[in-house]
Structure formats: C-alpha cells, structure tokens
Image (spheres, grey):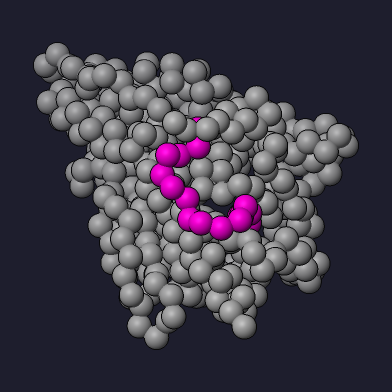
Amino acid sequence: MNATLSTRGVEFDRPSTPRASGASQRVVVALEQRFERTPDGIVWGPGTFSPEFWGRYLEAFDKVTVVARIRPVRFPSARFERCDAEAVEFLPVPHYLGPWEFLRHWKPVRNAALAGLDRDCSVIVRIPSPIGSFIVGHLQRLGKPYAVEVVGDPYDVMSPQAFRHPLRPLLRWWLVRQQRNACLGATGAAYVTERTLQQRYPCRGYSVGVSDVRLAPVRDRQVAAFMAQYSSVTLTQCVPAPRTYAGGPLQRIALVAVATLSQMYKGLDVLIDAVGRCVTNGLDTRLTIVGEGKHQGELEARAASMGIDKRVRFTGFLTRDQVTTELDAADVFVLPSRCEGLPRALIEAMARGLPCIASNVGGIPELLEPRDLVTPGSVEMLSGAIVDVANDAGRRAAMSAHNLSRANDFRDDLLKNRRVAFYLRVRAATERWIAQQDVP
C-alpha cells in the first residue's frame, strides 16, 4: 500500500515501485523560471510550478532543492501561486532580466547555482538554461552523473523572428552549444517531444521508443546512458467523444487562440492578418485571443487598422475553467507560432476535441496531421487553411477525432510511470557513483 506525502495541503502518493537502496536522497532541480519570495519566506510563481509539479520528483526523491532566480517582493505578482512545500526548498540565484544583466552578474549567478550541490545529491537540469549550464560544466569536471529534462529549443527561441537583441546571434550559438554538450554528457535525458528535440540534441549513443525507458551502453563512458520521453504537459481529463458536424460549410467561423502576449513569437499578428484576409474573401470570421502581455495594445491597433477590431476579442487572463469555456465555444483553435516546444495550449484544445491549425515548428508536427500545419509567418497559407476547414464538415470531424485521440496520449496516468521510472534511474545512477567514491 502506498504511503502518503503531504506538502502543505497537497498530498502525493508514494509509488509502490521499490526505490533504489540507500539513504535519504535530495534532488537538485535547476531551471530558468523566475519566482518571487515574500518577507514571510513563501515562494510564489506561475501555477505550472505549484506543489503538484514538484510532487513529480518526490515520487522518487525525499527532498527537492529548486535552483532558480528569485526576486524578493513585499507582495506576490497577480495570479502567482504558492510554489514551496514541506519537502521542497528554493535556493535563490541572483535575479536578472535579459542578456546584459546575466553577463554583468554571471559570477554571483554561477556561485549561487553551485552552492546547492553536494556529493550526495542527484541533479536534474531543465534546459535550455544559462543557470543550468554552470551546474552541468561543474559536474562534468567532477565526473558526477546528472540528468537533463529537455523542455525547449534555444535555436528556435533565439531565432530572428522570436527574439530581437544585439546579442541574439551570440546567445543563440552559445545556448545551442551548451544544450548539445549537456545532452551528450548526461547520464539520463528526458524530452518533451517524441523525436524533434532528440534529433537536434541527442543523448550520446542511444535511441529509444516512446513507450518505455530503456538502458543502453554508451561507448567510452563508464556509466550507462538512458533516455525517456514524457511531456511536461499532462491532462487529467479529455472530453469523452469527438465533435460531430452537420453537412455543409460554416456560414460563420469562431476561432480561438490561447497564448502569451508578452512576446510576438506566438504569431498572433499573423493570425490577425489572416482573419482580415478571410473577411475580405467573404468568410464571416470571429477571433478570440486568450492571454495577456505587453503587446496587447499593439495587436489591438493592428486589428483596428484593418477594420476588424469588432471581430477580434481580447479576453486578458482567464482561469482554467474560463479557458475551457472559450475552447468549447469555438470552431477552430489556431496557433501560428514562429517557434515552439510542445505547446500546452494546443494539447489542451485537442483534449476538447477541437479542430486545430498550427505552424509546422518544434514539436507541433508530432501532434497534428500534415494538412493541418502551415508555414510560420504565411498569412496566405493560414487564411487558406481556415477557409478550407470552414467549408468542409467532414474534415472538421476528422480533425476532431484525430486530435482527441492524440491528446489522450498525454493523460497524466499514462505519463506518470515514465517520469517515475526516469527519476528512479537518476537516483540509482547517483547512488552508484557515491558508492564508487566510498571505495578506499
């Protein structure tokens, strides 16, 4: 029978899978996310990193030390949630914003990142991460095993279309180089995609099927390398059945996009232009944009300049239940990103049985059928896809069925076993290394 671990009101079941032998073990998890700490010591951040998230690591480890940027504040930012927990501690790295501040403060950032390490801890670095690169380099010099969770691609994130900065080419080169080095030297690597990130950032000498975690020997290394695939996007529930449609074209189509407006890489400017073209071509088109950020005013002005401001609605921030309501009310979800990893919003739309159109970047081609993909930045191709879907009820039904079936692959009950198996192997690799150090 599984024991229960309580983390300040949130409970997690211990796995019945036997853990590796050895004393209580701590795992250090390094990532690039920014958090806030109030005077009472509570750590706050995006809901993605609430205690439930860290509970994944507590399935295999006894304690989690999170190494990340933490900014002291009097009051937490709006909509931030509590992230610390009884078995989860946060080790602050000096807070910085942007490349210039990182370069100015790289030495205290490095020293703080390394301060959380000791001989007996396991280490998992979520990359891409400049903070994580310091930890990886240090552990490689020591010969101590570490694992990586590859959650994004710096090559795409630092593309000219997604990031504008004088240091962009240098940062892109450095981050890609660091990520390749981290994966090649890792004892274990887990990817959010099934093949896309694996091909660009391989874990040396290994190939894996997506259904399991396997071990394989690696040439010229003293330890085995292992690799896994599990998305950081997990679903607790999908709709029970695909959508059904009466024959004939839609006289009016309702589009929805869920994306941050803090950066332009989600391609919402392209989507607004595509809506304008659809309207010009005679299709009664309405667009709802769910999200908030500094570019909202710019996007609103863009819609107004095209005369479609009455057709484009900006909701701002919505709760999860409110987002679900918007998805259920829409005819098509659209995500014309210029770069992506494995987008949570797209998978959640698919779980509602919603037909989806998205760019053929990152891990998106692993999710959608080829004919539902468009070239990023192409207004003509995106508007054409919207019109085609509006005119074809059979295609909408097929899209709904495919998307719902694919989304079921991301149910938490299916991915949990992969994650736990990976973490247990990380722990076992560390314990073997510790035992070797203890040999006189």
Image position of 431 (left or right of 37): left
- Which quadrant of the structure image shows residue 136? bottom right
Q: Please tell me whether residue 136 is drawn above or below residue 300 in the rendered image.
A: below
Q: Please tell me whether residue 75 is drawn above or below residue 144 in the rendered image.
A: above
Q: Which residues are magenta?
A: 13-28
Observer able to see residue 72: yes
Q: Main secondary structure of the magenta part?
A: loop
- Which quadrant of the structure image shows residue 29? bottom right
- Which quadrant of the structure image shows residue 218? bottom left
Of 86 and 431, which appears nearest the observer?
431
Asked if the magenta segment contains residue 17, the reply would be yes
Where residue 84 sits: x, y (%)? Answer: 70, 38
Q: Residue furthest front?
A: 440
Where residue 165 sits: x, y (%)? Answer: 63, 63
Q: Residue furthest bottom?
A: 220
Q: Quadrant of the N terminus?
A: top left
- The count of marks equals 0
Of 150 and 370, which appears nearest the observer?
150
Residue in view at x 61 percent, y 75 percent: 438
Asked if the magenta segment contains residue 138, the reply would be no
Image position of 206 (left or right of 244): right
Of 384 and 118, which appears nearest the observer?
118
Of 107 and 333, which appears nearest the observer?
107
Residue in view at x 33 percent, y 65 percent: 215
Q: Quadrant of the C terminus?
A: bottom right
Observer able to see residue 80: no
Residue in view at x 47 percent, y 33 percent: 2
Where residue 86 sits: x, y (%)? Answer: 70, 37
Residue in view at x 29 percent, y 33 percent: 408
